[in-house]
Amino acid sequence: MDLSEQTFLILSALADQPRHGYAVVTEVDKMTDGRIRLRAGTLYGALDRLVTQGLIAPDHDEVEKGRLRRFYKLTDAGADAVRAESRRMAAAVRLAEERLSKRGARNAPRLGTIG
């Protein structure tokens, strides 16, 4: 299953520990150096979808400053999906780097040739 970048980042944010929604937003922001900023509406829709797909599960609820926070955890299926997507992306990076290295060799000046 190919994951969208947003899904991959949400699952990755939950890989090391359960987090509540705002903590997922903060973690994704940190992981991407601010390049990806999840909006609450988008995040909670994605969390519901990921629960339905079995990639994450509710872990526990806490009340903080009078607000209920639901924590989510990565399931084994979610971890498998992150691993598979990581491998797929690593293979794509290797292929791109191989092609770029050939480009560099092709564009290098050759001895005895003009321009």
Image (cartoon, rainbow, N blue to C red):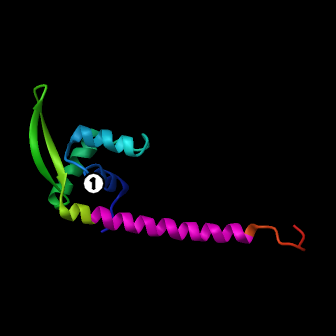
Residue in view at x 43 percent, y 41 percent: 33
Question: Where are the magenta residues, as a range?
Answer: 81-106
Q: Quadrant of residue 22?
A: top left
The x, y position of residue 23, in whole percent, is 25, 39
Q: Quadrant of residue 104?
A: bottom right
Residue in view at x 38 percent, y 45 percent: 31
The x, y position of residue 98, in whole percent, is 58, 70
The image quadrant where one finds the N terminus is bottom left
Which residue is the extreme one toward the bottom?
Answer: 112
- Specify few, some or many for label 1: CA neighbours under 10 Å numbering under 14, 14-19, or 20 or more: many
- Magenta run includes residue 100: yes
Which residue is the extreme one toward the top?
Answer: 65
The image quadrant where one finds the C terminus is bottom right
Q: What is the magenta segment's predominant secondary structure?
A: helix
Tell me if 74 is positioned left or right of 1 in this view.
left
Q: Which residue is mark 1?
A: 11
- Magenta run includes residue 90: yes
Residue in view at x 51 percent, y 68 percent: 94
Answer above or below: position of 75 versus 62.
below
